[in-house]
């Protein structure tokens, strides 16, 4: 797509990355920027300033980025596009904990702004550990780089956004002292994934789905985000996080809100966010009874994955031998509003499970077994599966008569999905998100009240997990979590669908 001049004007900016030598920058941000150049979505007047503590030249830094692109970009590295990106990248050595350095940074950026004609617009991307978020925001604020009248300044903040409601609120207040809410982009990278954006499209452009999208016709909804990998080198982080903070508070709650939301009055950012928020607020009260009956925790033991022996969570680097951190959670919850009351949402996520995949299964109610399915045939329900990854697309299951026999009914499976490994051809979540940040569209980012409502929910479950001593480890790596997760559904006469 070729950008027209109006868009070009709007997108011109300096993209400043705090944490320019970190993993996120190498794996996601730079490949995202490269692919935007490749798709001709970056403006001509655009610069990237990567900030790092280590001493190196821009040339050395660019060489490192080139190696990272070869490894992580979904598109092959074409020298023409790489050269275009290369000349936009600059390395700036700076210890961002040093408050006295921010004025120099401002002077450097101002000069670059004139030279590169980037119109004073700035994106400050915090790709650093969360303990530095407030420090950096303060530095940006005291050097007058936030909230400028003559240009825009946007702050992009990675997760985790706080470690509970209290710390998240404090962080938010601090950030709001420096930036307006409209200029804050709280990343939830799941929102940048193709099929997550597709949930609304699928629902609100297809009468056959939307007219059945309620407790009247839907038996239950299942959301599974499973991963084969363990915590790897992130044990230090994960030990203080666990699956609830890592996946439920953000990605899963966001998915749930898109699946269950009412149609917004239009596609404006706030109209969508208002409807999403109402879903989170309608999640049932977290009572002791709910916690006892509807929440299952797990932690992985050693096991076999893809034929290889893997170690238990407690044997991972930086994880204590008696760790009580959950690497798996399963939940059953109700969204208590008119549309959904009575239709359970089953949720599960975990590490070292039998597959890496993300899927939403919508199971429709069964028809009365009066005409068909009276005798031996079990009625297979209609299933709509939104496949987020690695397959990307939609699967639908329905029944027809079997052509080969007189009476039998067969279950047909229509599948529009195709496998997209991270190197595949679906735009990476970060590409879409970076592009939206430049365009000033924050629809795919979380507004504070959504984050807050999600923390109110997650906090209760985290507190419960901290008090409860579960016999960990309680599931073997390579399986689908503890037995109790299966019992959670079996109790209701249901099962986790494995499509
Ligand atoms: C991150 C979590 O937010 O999401 C990780 O911190 C997790 O623990 C990752 O592995 C999963 O994202 P994706 O895009 O690989 O499904």
Image (cartoon, helix red, strand yellow):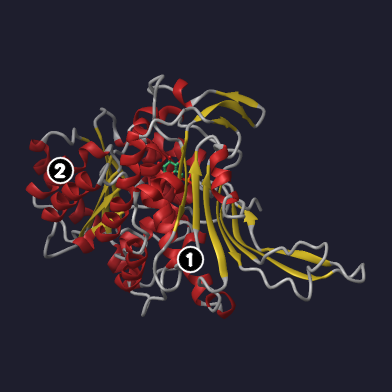
Asked whether 264 or 435 is in front, the reply is 264
The answer to which of marks 1 and 2 sits earlier in the sequence is: 2
Q: Is residue 153 left or right of residue 464?
A: left
SS class of the residue under badge 1? loop
Which residue in the structure is indicated by mark 2? 105
Vertical comparison of 415 with 98: above or below: below
Residue 461: percent from the left, percent from the top? Answer: 35, 45
**Can you tell which mark lies on residue 353?**
none
- C-alpha separation, residue under disc 1 versus residue under disc 2: 56 Å
SS class of the residue under badge 2? helix
Packing grade of label 1 (10 A; few <14, some 14-19, many >=20) is some
Vertical comparison of 109 with 182: above or below: above
Q: Is residue 190 left or right of residue 274?
A: right
Vertical comparison of 370 with 122: above or below: below
Residue 468: percent from the left, percent from the top? Answer: 37, 34
Which residue in the structure is indicated by mark 1? 342
The image quadrant of residue 324 is: top left
Residue 388: percent from the left, percent from the top? Answer: 54, 55
Q: Nearer the viewer, mark 1 or mark 2?
A: 1
Asked whether 439 or 380 is in front, the reply is 380
Q: Is residue 193 left or right of residue 374?
A: left
Asked whether residue 438 is in view, the answer is yes
Asked whether 146 or 309 is in front, the reply is 309
Instruction: Indicate the quadrant of ligand 1 in the picture.
Output: top left
Question: Residue at left 29%, top 65%?
Answer: 440
Residue 329: percent from the left, percent from the top? Answer: 46, 42
Question: Residue at left 32%, top 54%?
Answer: 454
Question: Residue at left 55%, top 62%?
Answer: 220
Residue that protrudes farthest toward the front in the picture: 289
Packing grade of label 2 (10 A; few <14, some 14-19, many >=20) is many
Asked whether 401 or 258 is in front, the reply is 401
Vertical comparison of 246 with 195: above or below: above
């Amino acid at each position: 797509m070729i950008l027209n001049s109006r868009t070009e004007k709007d997108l011109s900016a300096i993209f400043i990355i705090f944490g320019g030598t970190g993993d996120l920058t190498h794996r996601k941000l730079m490949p995202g920027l490269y692919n935007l150049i490749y798709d001709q979505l970056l403006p001509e007047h655009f610069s990237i300033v990567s900030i790092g503590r280590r001493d190196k030249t821009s040339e050395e830094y660019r060489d490192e980025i080139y190696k990272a692109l070869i490894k992580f970009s979904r598109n092959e590295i074409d020298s023409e596009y790489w050269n275009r990106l290369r000349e936009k990248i600059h390395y700036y050595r700076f210890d961002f904990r040093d408050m006295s350095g921010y004025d120099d940074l401002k002077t450097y950026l101002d000069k670059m702004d004139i030279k590169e004609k980037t119109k004073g617009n700035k994106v400050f991307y915090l790709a650093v550990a969360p303990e530095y978020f407030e420090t950096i925001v303060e530095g940006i604020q005291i050097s007058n780089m936030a909230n400028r009248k003559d240009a825009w300044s946007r702050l992009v903040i990675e997760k985790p956004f706080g470690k509970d409601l209290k710390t998240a609120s404090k962080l938010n207040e601090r950030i709001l002292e420096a930036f307006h809410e409209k200029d804050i982009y709280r990343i939830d990278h799941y929102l940048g994934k193709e099929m997550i954006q597709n949930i609304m499209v699928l629902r609100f452009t297809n009468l056959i789905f939307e007219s059945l999208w309620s407790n009247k016709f839907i038996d239950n909804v299942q959301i599974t985000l499973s991963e084969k990998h363990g915590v790897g080198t992130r044990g230090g982080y994960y030990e203080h996080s666990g699956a609830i903070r890592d996946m439920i508070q953000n990605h899963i709650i966001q998915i749930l809100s898109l699946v269950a939301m009412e149609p917004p009055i239009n596609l404006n950012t706030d109209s969508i966010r208002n409807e999403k928020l109402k879903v989170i607020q309608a999640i049932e009260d977290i009572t002791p009874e709910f916690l006892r009956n509807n929440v299952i925790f797990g932690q992985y033991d050693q096991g076999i994955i893809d034929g290889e022996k893997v170690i238990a969570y407690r044997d991972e680097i930086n994880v204590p031998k008696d760790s009580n951190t959950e690497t798996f959670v399963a939940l059953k919850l109700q969204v208590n509003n008119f549309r959904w009351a009575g239709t359970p949402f089953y949720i599960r996520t975990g590490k070292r499970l039998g597959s890496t995949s993300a899927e939403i299964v919508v199971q429709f109610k069964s028809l009365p077994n009066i005409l068909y399915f009276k005798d031996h045939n079990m009625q297979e329900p209609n299933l709509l599966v939104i496949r987020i990854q690695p397959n990307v697309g939609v699967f639908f299951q329905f029944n027809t008569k079997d052509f080969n026999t007189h009476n039998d009914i067969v279950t047909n499976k229509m599948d529009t999905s195709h496998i997209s490994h991270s190197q595949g051809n679906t735009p990476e979540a970060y590409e879409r998100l970076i592009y939206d940040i430049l365009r000033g569209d924050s629809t795919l980012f979380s507004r504070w009240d959504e984050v807050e409502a999600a923390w109110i929910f997650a906090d209760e479950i985290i507190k419960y997990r901290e008090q409860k001593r579960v016999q960990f480890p309680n599931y073997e790596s390579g399986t689908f979590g503890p037995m109790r997760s299966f019992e959670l559904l079996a109790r209701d006469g249901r099962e986790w669908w494995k499509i």
